[in-house]
Image (spheres, rainbow, N blue to C red):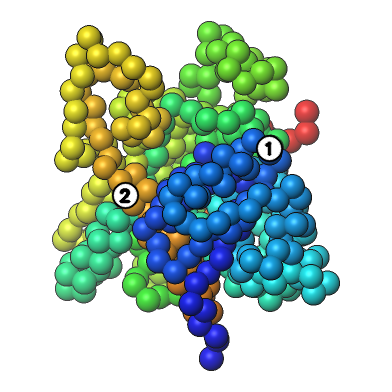
Amino acid sequence: MAEIRDRLRVGFVGSGFIAHFHLKSMVGVRNVDVTGVYSRSAEKRQKFADAVAELGLGTCRTHETLESLLTADDVDAIWILSPNDTRLGVMRELHRLKKDGRSKVFAVACEKPLARTVAEAREMVRLVDDAGLNHGYLENQVFCTPVLRGKEIIWRRAASTTGRPYLARAAEEHSGPHEPWFWQGDKQGGGVLSDMMCHSVEVARHLLTAPGAKRNSLKVKAVNGTVANLKWTRPFYADQLKSRFGAEVDYRNRPSEDFARGTVELEDEDGNELMIEATTSWAYVGAGLRIQLELLGPEYAMEFNSLSTGLKVFMSRAVTGAEGEDLVEKQNAEQGLMPVLEDEAGVYGYTDENRHMVECFRKGETPLETFHDGLAVVEILMGLYMSSELGRTVRFPEPELENYVPVVARAR
């Protein structure tokens, strides 16, 4: 039986937007201390450590090198929250230090997507298994409070009497990412399909999976994808991106897709056909980040829209101020009637996700989402990219996916 630790001491790799989202959610997690942080920016590292102290989450040391964090005596688990193009390097360094007996880290969690290609994702899985680490894949939408409650009700009350659900729809849209690397296909691994459809296909797969069933109980049969550039390649907006982020984000000459649509055909253990429909966009200008979910079955339906909030505020033209992201992430207005999410970290799933990971790591249990699930998601994403490039449905298994790189992520 695995040793149960009283508290888990977590080190963060990365100190950007998503790291602070995870940090805020940790306030709602018991038995955890945030004890270390490493990122490339000394200023951001210190700002993060100050936030840890302000939130009462422990004494956080800043580390000038990744090796320093991974070999620290006060770090049990690592949260990998750095940009996509750095994650495999972080995992290789952790693997090296574990094999050399220099790191006491025994668990690692990685933000979505696990990697930029199937080959990278498979290497992440190999490294974490070879190092003997417990591991979790940080897919927050699986832990969204409406998803947790909705799935429980549907499967207990409806599916048990009229049959399993057969169609899941998932959509996520906002007006575009915060950081320049997200817009660079080679660094990020793609465009909006890589960035956001990883959420949509996995939360849909989760909703369609019977409670307690193995994660591979649903078999992917085929995928069909479409990508497009709807907004950010228009000259005015391409120049706007260059002005905001610098010459490296050049959407006149090197764009990544800002719209993606995918269908995923699956089969359950009994041979029943199931479907996922997913759409994502960086070209949505509205009241902020919009997540829409539906689950349909023989005699029932479930739906959720993150912007259909109970709390709303109205501000007239006379009220002026800074950007309204304190109300809803990616809010595009500061006036008018606006939805407010009272607890974004909770509704979006970060609090329950981190609570689950901390407890699993503390008790030596396998999390609901692991690196193996992250690999499965990347396989679906690459299938969708290949489908969009070839203009046809891609049937699984597809050996060519192993080393496939999306068009927008290929070398210049």
Instruction: Specify few, some or many for label 2: CA neighbours under 10 Å numbering under 14, 14-19, or 20 or more.
Output: some
In the picture as drawn, the residue positioned furthest to the bottom comes out as 1
Which residue lies at the image location 55% right of the left edge and 86% below the top edge? 2
- Can the viewer see residue 70? yes
Instruction: Specify few, some or many for label 1: CA neighbours under 10 Å numbering under 14, 14-19, or 20 or more.
Output: few
Q: Would residue 285 appear left or right of 304 to someone viewing this image?
A: right
Residue 283 against residue 182 in the figure, above or below: above
Q: Which residue is mark 1?
A: 41
Q: Position of residue 196 (x, y in %)?
A: 49, 42
Q: Position of residue 369 (x, y in %)?
A: 49, 65
Q: 119 or 322: which is nearer to us? A: 322
Q: Amino acid at mark 2?
A: Val
Q: Position of residue 231 (x, y in %)?
A: 48, 19
Q: Position of residue 275 (x, y in %)?
A: 38, 55
The image shows a total of numbered marks equal to 2
Examine the image and state in which quarter residue 45 appears: top right
Q: Which mark is residue 347?
A: 2
Examine the image and state in which quarter residue 353 appears: bottom left
Examine the image and state in which quarter residue 35 appears: bottom right
* Label 2 – label 1 distance at C-alpha: 30 Å
